[in-house]
């Protein structure tokens, strides 16, 4: 098809006319079981009636006024996020990349506010992904993503996930440490609770900020609302997006009072961030997570899905080699090229997402049923059985 849309995506040859729960229907009426969830976005599936009703009610009142004025829905959402987390302040934006950009600015501003202008470097980690803006590309330091975009901003030090290397890397230039508790794009790499505790200790000792990118692994995807809860630590800054709006674009930066002290009027801004529609939907999403016992569902079905995938590893050991993840952010390590497998799964009506290091991501809606999990396993088994190698 000769499209006027810029050619930045490798798209599947399909368009969808409607969705319902974990299922999508294409224009030619083929059914697809969606275990991609819009890349971890549609955490309550497609066409959720209560989210639809919330959107309609708010859209019929007011869509946008800008942050020149107090927005009641924004105030309510900020209060709710703070009540549920370590945070005392929230900044709203439109996407994950914007949230991470905001977190970087907050960390640098914090050090500047404290009189340490030279402390402006952020330590990040191999196999990370923090967004597609120039600064977030620089943070991840993946040459596949940065090629052709020079000069890439400096101010980032990218290292392996290693305690000794991390400890030696901290210097009088370090402003903060940025890490995903579960690396998503990098291949579903859960960071151990012990490593997160170690980072917290280093940050306290060196008076730097701990920044957790939970754009993909937050909002219940690991079985807790915020993935760092498994480790028992409290970060200084957390970034959210994707599942926060369950399909409606909204991002947020959560911060402690101390970390956000440098952010004064004019320090940062967003035209659309925290608009009434996005905030109303996010409030409803949080309410539904609590009301529908979503976190319990994630924990229960995660165990089933991982167990069934491990059986497929034994059965198809010459095609896939392992399973890793936490909650319903699960990666299957491939021997055959991951894109070959996901392309065939697509033909079988199962939507999956590739990740780096030859991994396939399973990212179903968090309210998925056990029957749908078993249907996905069946389709994946058929896919692997029909794979010629």
Image (spheres, grey):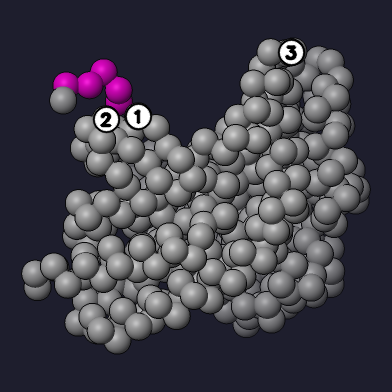
Where residue 353 appears, as percent x and y from the top left, is 36, 55
Residue range (magenta): 2-7
Q: Locate residue 185 relative to residue 295 in the image: left or right.
A: left
Magenta highlight: main SS: loop
Q: Locate residue 138 relative to residue 300 in the image: left or right.
A: left
Q: Which residue, given by chain and number where applicable, does mark 2 sit on?
A: 27
Q: Which residue, given by chain and number where applicable, does mark 1 sit on?
A: 17
Say whether marks 2 and 1 touch (CB < 8 Å): yes
User: Magenta includes 245?
Assistant: no
Mark 2 or 1, nearer chain start: 1
The residues bearing labels 2 and 1 have C-alpha atoms spaced at a distance of 5 Å
Q: Which secondary structure, mark 1? A: strand
Mark 3 or 2, nearer chain start: 2
The answer to whether 378 is drawn above or below residue 100 in the figure is: below
- Classify mark 2: residues with Cα within 10 Å, few (<14), some (14-19) or many (20+): few
Where residue 43 appears, as percent x and y from the top left, is 56, 49
Q: Which residue, given by chain and number where applicable, does mark 3 sit on?
A: 61
Q: Locate residue 90 relative to residue 152 in the image: left or right.
A: right
């Amino acid at each position: 098809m000769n499209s006027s849309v810029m050619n930045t995506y490798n798209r599947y040859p399909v368009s969808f006319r409607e969705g319902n729960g974990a299922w999508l229907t294409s224009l030619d009426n083929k059914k697809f079981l969606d275990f991609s969830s819009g890349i971890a976005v549609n955490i309550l599936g497609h066409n959720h009636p209560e989210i639809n009703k919330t959107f309609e009610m708010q859209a019929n009142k007011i869509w946008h006024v800008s942050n020149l004025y107090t927005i009641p829905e924004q105030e309510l959402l900020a209060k709710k996020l703070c009540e549920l987390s370590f945070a005392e302040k929230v900044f709203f934006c439109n996407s994950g990349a914007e949230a991470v950009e905001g977190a970087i600015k907050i960390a640098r501003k914090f050090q500047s506010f404290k009189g340490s202008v030279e402390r402006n470097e952020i330590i990040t980690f191999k196999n990370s992904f923090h967004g597609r803006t120039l600064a977030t590309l620089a943070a991840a330091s993946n040459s596949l993503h940065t090629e052709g975009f020079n000069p890439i901003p400096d101010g980032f030090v990218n290292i392996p996930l290693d305690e000794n290397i991390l400890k030696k890397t901290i210097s009088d230039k370090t402003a903060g440490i940025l890490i995903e508790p579960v690396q998503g794009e990098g291949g579903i790499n859960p960071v151990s609770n012990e490593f997160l505790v170690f980072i917290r200790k280093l940050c306290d000792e060196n008076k730097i900020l701990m920044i957790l990118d939970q754009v993909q692994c937050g909002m219940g995807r690991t079985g807790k609302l915020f993935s760092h809860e498994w480790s028992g630590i409290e970060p200084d800054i957390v970034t959210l997006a994707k599942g926060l709006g369950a399909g409606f674009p909204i991002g947020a930066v959560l911060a402690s009072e101390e970390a956000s002290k440098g952010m004064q009027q004019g320090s940062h801004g967003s035209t659309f961030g925290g608009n009434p529609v996005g905030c109303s939907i996010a409030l409803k999403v949080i309410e539904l997570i609590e009301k529908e016992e979503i976190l319990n569902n994630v924990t229960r079905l995660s165990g089933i899905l991982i167990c069934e995938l491990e059986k497929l590893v034994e059965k198809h050991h010459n095609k896939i080699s392992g399973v890793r993840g936490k909650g319903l952010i699960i990666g299957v390590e491939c021997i055959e090229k991951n894109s070959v497998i996901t392309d065939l799964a697509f033909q079988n009506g199962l939507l999956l997402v590739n990740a780096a290091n030859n991994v396939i991501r399973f990212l179903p809606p968090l309210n998925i049923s056990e029957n749908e999990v078993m249907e996905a396993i069946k389709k994946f088994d058929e896919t692997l059985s029909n794979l010629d190698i």
